[in-house]
Amino acid sequence: MTNFWSWFLCSVLWIASIQFSNGQEKIDFARDIRPILSDRCFKCHGFDDAAREADLGLHTFDAATADLGGYQAIKPGDAENSEIIYRMESDDRTEAMPPAKANKPRLTPEEIAKFKQWINEGAKYEQHWAFVHPRERTSNIERPTPNIELGENEIDFFVGRRLKQEGFNFSPEADPHTLIRRVYLDLIGIPPTPNQADEFAGKIKSEGFLPAMESVIDELLASPQYGEKWARHWLDLSRYADTNGYEKDRPRSIWPYRDWVITALNADMPYDQFTIEQLAGDMLPNATLDQKIATGFHRNTMMNEEGGIDPLEYRYHAMVDRVATTGTVWMGLTTGCAQCHTHKFDPITHTDYFALFALLNNADEPDLDVPTEAVHTSRADIRRQVRREEHDLMSKIDPDKFQKWLESEKAAVVEWKTIRPTEAKSNLPRLAILKDDSVLASGDFTKRDVYDLKFDLSGIEKPITAIRLEALPHPSLPAHGPGTAYYEGRKGDFFLSEMIAKIDSTKVGFHEPSISFGKIYIGSGKVVPEGVYDGNGSSGWSTATAEGRRHELVLNFKKPISGKVLDLNLLFERHFVAALGRFRISVSTDEKIAKARASDLDLATAEESELKRLYVRESPEFAEARKEIEALEKKVPAFPTTLVLRERPADNTRPTFRHHRGEYLQVKEPVAPAVPAIFVPIESEANRLNFAKWLVSEKNPLAARVAVNRAWRAFFGRGIVHTAGDFGLQSKLPSHPDLLDWLAVDLIDDGWSMKRLHKKIVLSRTYRQSSVVTPESLRTDPKNILLGRGPRFRMSGEMIRDSALAASGLLTQKIGGPSVYPPQPASVAAAAYGNTKWPAATGPDRYRRSLYTFSKRTAPFAAYLTFDGPTGESCLARREISNTPLQSLTLLNDEMFLETARALAASCFNPTEAFRQSEPAGLKIFRTVLTREPTDAELAGIDAFFKTQLARLESGELSAKDICGKDDPTLASWTLVARVILNLDEAVTKS
Amino acid sequence: MNLHSSTRRQFFETCGIGLGKIALGSMLTAGISRAATHFAPKAKRVIYLFMAGAPSQLELFDNKPKLVEFDGKPIPPEVIAGQRYAFIQPDAAVLAPRFPFAKHGQSGQELSDRLPHLAKVADEIAIVKSVHTDQFNHSPAQIFVNTGGPIPGRPSMGSWLSYGLGSETQDLPGFVVLKSGGNLSGGAAMWSAGFLPGKHAGVPFRESGDPILHVSNPKGIDDQAQRDSLDLIKKLNQQHLKAVADPEIQTRINSYEMAWRMQSAAPELTDFSKEPKSVMDSYGKGDYAKNCLLARRLIERGVRFVQVYHSGWDHHSQVENGVKKQAEATDQGSAALIKDLKDRGLLDDTLIVWGGEFGRTPMVEASAALNRSQGRDHHPQAFTMWFAGGGIKPGITIGQTDELGFNVVEDPVHVHDVQATILHLLGIDHEKLTYQYQGRDFRLTDVHGHVVKKLLA
C-alpha cells in the first residue's frame, strides 16, 4: 500500500510537471521544444537533405550537436555557447533565425528561455510520442482506478485527473431526456420518440442510472441503424461517391461497397479484420465475394473521363490519393508532403513515400459482378422464355425454305483455321495466350496501344486467301469485353485503327473487308471496314453497344500468299483506352471471298436443332417474328457491379519509381515496396496484404490511436488529438495523452471491437455530463478541451435531415441498395457538366436515410454541402462545423424540409380533438423533434404564433392549401409551427 | 417578384419591387475585413472573365502569317518531340489562321477582325501572348488556373482573397460565380474553398430558380408569415440560450437574421430596370453580356471577386465557325464592361482579367471516328490573356511566341505568375498568404510564381 501510494504520488507529480510546468520547471521536449523546432526550423534544417541549408540539421541530436568547425548549433549543457541561441536572439538581418524570407515569426523571449533551459539540461531529444507504441507508453503511466461508486469508468479517471489538476470538476449528469437524445443521435443517428425517452426516464427511476443506460446502449448497438450511422463517418474517410469526379463526373456503381461497410459495422467486425479486408480482401486465401467487394475502399478514388487525358497520369493521381488516405486513416501521417520531396517535418523520405506507394501499386482495377438472387432469377426466367419462343418459331419452319437457306449458307461459308500466336507483345498491356488460341489482354493500357503477334504458318498447306479477327468477350474485361475501354467510351468497347499483316516480311494487300457488326460510340463517325488498312488511325472498327458478345472482321487478301511466318500488327488509337481485350485470329485458304458472319456455328458439324435455331435467328423468313425475341433479350438484366482491386499476376507486376518533385512525367529510379524506415519493417513479403496486416499489428504505433481518436471526435466534436488525420510532428499535442494511449491499448486488447469502445465512451461520466455552459467554463475552457462538460455541437446535414424525417414519420427504413434521389432544386445538378438531371424520387426512396442519397462529386446534394458535408473528392478526417445564413435558408425554405414539417404536423395533429388549442399538437410537435418537455414560456410562444397564423389562414390572407396541401387552416398553422420547431438551434444540435 | 418561379431570363428582365439596399450578412464570406494586405493594393476587386474551353489565340490575338506558308505541312519534328496531346497525333499538319489581323488604337495593339469592340478599347488593355500552363486537359487546366493545382481540393483564388482580405460587403457574398455558354469542365472545384473554411467558397448564381439557393420563401409563405416564423425561432432560441448558455446559439440567431436580410436584398441586385438604356445597349444581348453587367452591379455593391465563366471555346472541329460564334457572343460585353467601369471611375481599382485555360494548336485536328475536321487541339505551350484596370499598364503587349505560334520565345508567363500578379495587385504577397493543412503551409501559387513586373502600371 505504501509502495503504491508513493508510486502514485510520484506519477502524479511527474505528470503534473510535464503537463503544467511553466518557466523554470522541467522542460518537456515534446511539448516545449519540438513544436518550435518543427514549425520554425525544420523546413530548412529538417529531415529533407535536399532542402537543408548551411548543411545543418536540427532534427536529431547528432545532427544538431555536430561540430560546425569549432562551434555547435547546440552545445548540450551550454546554452550560451550554442549558435542556435545566438541566432535566435540576433538582430542582424544576415544571421537572425528564422530568417525573414522564411515568413515565420521570430522566437519570443519566453520561447528562447525554454530553449536555453533545455540545452542547459542536456538538450535531450525524445522520440515523437506518436511513433512510440501506446503499449510501451501505457506501461509507464498510472493504472486507471475509476471511482465506480460515482458511476465512473477508466475514461473518467483520466479526464477527471486532468480536470482536478486544473482546479475543475465534472459537470452534473445531463437530465435523462437530454442524455437519451444524445445517445440515440450518437449511436443510431436519429432521435428517440417521446415514448422511448419517457420509458428511459422511468427505467432510471426503477433500475438506476447505469443499468438503464446499459440496456438502451445494448439495444441501440444491436440496431441495424447503428451501422448506417457509423458507416457515414467511415464513408467520409473512404471518399465514397456515386460518380467518377472530374469533368464529366459520370455515375459509377460501387454501392455494394457502401453496403459492405454497413454490414461489417453492424456485425462489429473487428477493426483489424475490417482494415485487412478493405485494403487487401482480394489477396486473402479463397477470398469471398464480400472480401473482394471490401477492396472498393481504394477504388473510391476519382477517375477522369475527359476526352484525351492520359489515363495512366490519372491512375497515378489516384495512387497518390490512396497513399495519402492510407496515411491519414491508419497512420495519422500526412504522407502527401513527401510526394514531392522528403517530408520537412516528419521522418518520411521521398523514397519512403514511393516505397509506401509501391505497397499499394500492384493491383488491377476491374469491375466485379455482384450476382444477386433477384437478378439471377430474372435472367434465368427471361432466357427460358427466349428458348420457348425460339422453339415455337422452330416448329413453324418451312422445311423447303430451310433446306434452300442451308445450302446457300453452306456454299457461302469458308473454312477457317484458327492459328495460335507463337509470340504476343505489346507496348504495355500483358498479352496472355489462352487454351483456345485466343489472346487475352490485361494490366495497363494507353490511348495508343500496339499489339505485335507472330504466327507459325507451317501447318497451313495452301496459300492463304483471307484472315479473320474474332473479337471475343471475357469475364475479366470491362462489361465482359471484347474491348478494354473503361472510361469515356462505353465499357468494353475497342477501336481497331489499323491492322497490318506481313507474311515472311512482305506486306499483305487487303480487299473485300466485312464485319459482323460495327458501331462507333463517342463521336458521329461511322465504321468503315476499309478503315483498318487505310493508314488513317482515326478510322477503323468498333462494336460499341454490343458488349459482351462475339464479333468478327474478315479481310480478304488481294492475292493468295504462302509463307512460314505471319507478323500481325494491331493499332488501337482513340482519345481514350480502346485496345482489344480478347481476340483470336484465323486464316482461310478457300478460294471463295470470305464474309464476316454473326454466328460462329460450324454449319458442317452442327446439329439439326442448332441449325434451325440459327435459321430462326438469321433468315429473312422470320425477320418479323423474331423481333419479339430480340426485344426480350434486351431485357436480360445485367448483374450489379462494384469496383474492386485485383492483385496482379507474378509475371506482370507493376514497377514503382520515384517521381522527381512528385510529378507524373519525372520518372526516376525504381523503388521497392516497404513501410517508412522509421517503423519496424514488414517481416514477410512486402505486398499489399502484408502491409494491411502490418498496419493493424503491434508494429504500427498509430492505427489504434487514430481509430480511437476518430471515435472520440464523433462523440465529443473534438479529437483528443485535434488534428484528426495528423499525428505527426506538426500535429497538436493530445489534450489527454494517457487517455488516448490507454484507450488504444484497450481497443486492441478488446479484440478491436468498435461497439465495445463506443459503449465504454457512452457509459462514461465524461460523456454523461450536462452540456450547459457556465460563464466560468466559457471563460476558462471555451472549446471544452478539458471535457468539464458534455458535448454540444451542430449535427451534420445528413443527421439533420434524417432526424427531421424520423420525427415526421416519413423515414423509409430500408438498408442498402443503389443510391437514391431525394428532392432538391433542379439547378443544383444542372450546374454540373452535361446539364445533369436530378430525377427526384416520388416514392419511398424520397425519404431514405441520407447515407443513401446519390452522391455526385461535382454537384453534391446541396443541403449536405451547405452543412459542411463532403464532396468525396478526398479523404475527410474532420468535417468543419460552420454556422451560416445559407444553412438557415436551407432549413427555412428548402422544399424537402417543408415536406417534413407538413408530415410532422399531420402526425401530431388530431382533427377529431374537441378543442383545437395549441397544447396537444404543439406539445407533441415540440417533443417529437426535441425530445424534452417544453417550458411554459416556450409553449406560450408557440400558442401565440399558432393563433396569429390561424387567424391569417382563416381570413384567407394565407392559403392553407399552399402550405399544407389541404384546405385546413388548423393543419396549415400547425405546419408553420412544425417548420419553426425544425429550425430551432436545438433541433439541429446534439447536446 | 417571386424568384422561385422565375426563369433566368425573367430573373434579369422582370422589374423587381426594389426593396432597397438592406444590409446583408457579411458572414457569408469572411465576416470581418481582415485588411491584411502586405502592401498598398492597386486593385480592390476582380472581375475574371474566364473563357472556358480555351479560345484559339491564333484566331484572336497571336498573329502568325508563317502558318499560312506552312498550311497543310507537318510541324518540324524537333518542335513537337515529346509533346503529349489530347486528341491529335503530334505530326498533324499546320492549319493557317482563319482571320485577318489589324492594329488598333494609339498603342497599336494587334487584334483579329473578330474583336471589333475590344479594338475600340485596345488602349485600355494589356495583352500577354506568352502565357503557358502545365495541363493539357480542360478540367485539370481550368482547376489549375483557379486553384494552383490540377486536382480538385485546393482553395480557389476567390476563396484565398476572401480568406486573406475579408469581405467589403455587408450585403452579399464576397465571392460570386456567374456562368453562361454551357458545360464547365472544371466544375465546382473552381470556386471551392478547398481546405479553407467553407464560408470562403464562391457562391454560384443558379441558372434557374433562385439565383442563390432557397433565397425565396416557399410557396404559400408570405413575408409576414416568414417574419413571424423568424420571430418565433429567435424567441425560442433566445430562451434556450438562456438555459444552456452556448454562444453558438447566438451565432445561429444571427445567421437567421442575415438569411432574412439576404432574402430581401437579392431581388434588388438583379433588378436591371434602373439601368439607363444606353448602358443596357452598350453591353449587347445574350447571357454573357448580362453577366458582365451583373458583375458590375456586384462589385458596385462591394463584392470582392466575380467570376464570369463563358463556355463554348473548345473548337476541336471547325475552329473558324466556332471562334466567330463565341467572339460574337462575348466581344461586346467584355469591351462594354471596360468602358462602363471607366465611365464610373471604377476601372482604376477594379482588375479585369480575360483568358482561358490553355491555347490551341497551330496544327489541325481531324478525326474520322469523331467526325471532326478543320479544328485545333489543346495547346498548353502558349496562349493569350489580357488584363485591364487596377494597377495594370494599359496599351501594352507582353511576350512572344515563335513564328509557328508553338512555343513562347520571349517573357514566358506561367499560370502561377498570373496568380502571383493578381494577388500582388490586391496587395498580397503570394508567398505570404498561406494556410496550414495536413501539416503543410499551402498557398495559391504552390511553391512557384513570380509577379509579372512588366504588366504593372
Image: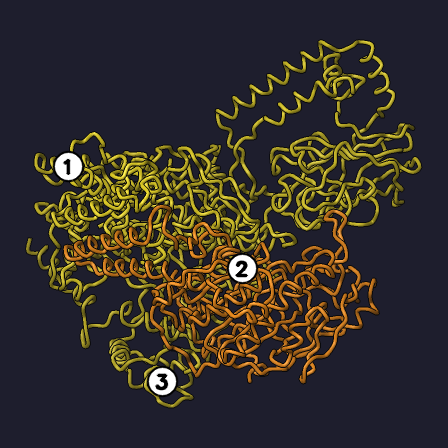
Element carrying mark 3: helix
Q: Is residue A781 visible?
A: yes
Query: Mark 2 is on which residue type?
Result: Lys
Q: Is residue A94 above or below residue A877?
A: below
Q: Check disc 2 and report its element: helix, strand or loop.
A: strand
> Same chain, marks 1 and 3?
yes
Q: State which mark lies toward you, 1 or 3.
A: 1
Q: In which image quadrant can residue A510 be found?
A: top right
Say the numbered circle drawn on residue A198.
Answer: 1
Please identify which colour was used for chain B in the image.
Answer: orange
Within 10 Å of the Cα at label 2, are there few (<14), some (14-19), or many (20+) other Cα atoms? many
Q: Are marks 2 and 3 in contact (CB under 8 Å)?
A: no
Residue under circle 2? B179
Q: Which label sits on residue A87? A: 3
Q: In the rendered view, would you say A362 is above or below B171? A: above
Q: Chain of mark 1?
A: A
Name the residue at 19% across, 76% down: A23
Say which chain is yellow.
A
